[in-house]
Amino acid sequence: MHRSERRVLTTHTGSLPRPVELTRLYARRSRGEAVSAEELEAAGKAALQWVVAKQAEVGIDVANNGEQQRDSFLLYVRDRLSGLDGTWQRRQRADVERYPIFKQQTFAAANSKESVDDIRGLTRARGEIRYLDAGPVAAECADFKAALEKSRAAFVEGFLTAPSPGMVSAIVLNEHYPSEEAYLAALAEALRVEYETIVGSGFMLQLDCPDLARERHNTYQDRPLGDFLGFAGRVIESINHALRNIPRDRVRMHVCWGNYEGPHDCDVPLEDIIPVMRRAKVGGFVLPFANPRHAHEFRYVKDLLVDDDQTIVAGVIDTTTNFVEHPEVVADRLERVAAVIGDPHRVMAGTDCGFESIAGKGRVAEDVAWAKLAALSEGARLASSRLF
């Protein structure tokens, strides 16, 4: 990971707003309607060109493809893995279930939008899990590289995202492997193809690992904390195995409690999961410190970093609200994180999560999202003038 040598560098968590027509195509396909592969490919490539230019315009230093060519940060892997068949519907989050009025309003609002369904129609693992073909991820890398060259933007670095084995295991119900360990190992070995292709193409790999926090109030909501931490530990082991051929400084890990506006009062504290996270062989972490439930947890960052070369991408922009953060608020948040670590060179400015992790599910209007990222850049400049 690049360090903030002379100023605080800016980045984000990966998913950015998609054009309305592209979202509509993904939503139609999600409903089982016929969508032309050629039309979807053309719309995705056009959106990629647009999103790269927009990142340059608002001052992002470490940019990505905005996940424009995927229907979500996670669901796309269903088309890249073997052994999948059937459907199931997984449990709702504990914090949503305990507030029935909120739950009803949330589902009513979601049903009124054109979006990809991330609740119904999830698939099952009924055979051997393998990565079918490296072609699609290689094409994503090539398209992103071409978009960067065409834009001529002076980005410091580019990154692409991929989900953790644990997050895939949460949405693909295991009906084939004899144990969770065996299932995670198979997923890790399959996803290794994606991880290595991204890094081999010259990009930073961001592992999206909401499972390391969110699954506490989802899959493990009725079980002891120790059971969840055991799961998280097994996920870390599978990740480390999948990363065995990748230099640690080419990987950053994003951990969050779910990219949705909700109570979040069943979230596991960051302090509880830090001992497990510390075992990950990664160059840094991307964490949310802007939302009201976890804004105070920046104080634990120093306990997370194992080595002096690890970096923190501090989430200082909330991706679930249409408030545009004042640059001074952004600067204050960055300065607090730098003070805890004791070294501003190891701090980057980022967002809590993605703006549209699942096509159509984002709560922040497109124009507001870009204004928030512009405020991120301005706040980073203010912090830099004080920290460097």
Image: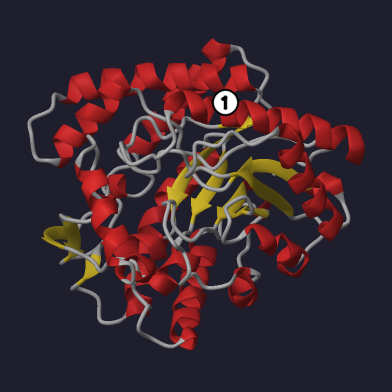
Give the residue at the far front of this rendering: 101
Type of amino acid under label 1: Ala
Q: Residue at x 46, y 72 (%)?
A: 266
Helix, strand or loop under label 1 = helix
Residue at x 73% of width, y 28% of height: 378
Q: Nearer the viewer, residue 302 or 145?
A: 302
Q: Position of residue 180 (x, y in %)?
A: 34, 78
Using residue 135 as the reference point, say whether residue 350 is left or right of it: right
Nearer the observer, 244 or 349: 349
Question: How was the colour assigned to the protein in this rendering?
Answer: secondary structure
Answer yes or no: is residue 371 visible: yes
Q: Name the residue located 48 percent from the left edge and 61 percent from the top edge.
A: 257
In this rendering, position of residue 137 left or right of residue 158: left
Q: Position of residue 26 (x, y in %)?
A: 23, 33
Give the labeled residue for mark 1: 371
Q: Residue at x 68, y 62 (%)?
A: 296
Residue 246: percent from left, percent from top: 58, 52
The answer to whether residue 377 is above or below residue 280 is: above
How many tags in the picture?
Answer: 1
- Residue 114 image point, x, y percent: 22, 34
Name above or below for residue 18 compared with residue 288: above
Mark 1 crowd level (few <14, some 14–19, many ≥20, 10 Å Cα): some
Q: Where is the C terminus found, in terms of image quarters?
A: top right
Q: Reply above or below: 309 against 374.
A: below
Residue 140 found in image quarter: top left
> Does residue 6 appear anywhere in the picture?
no
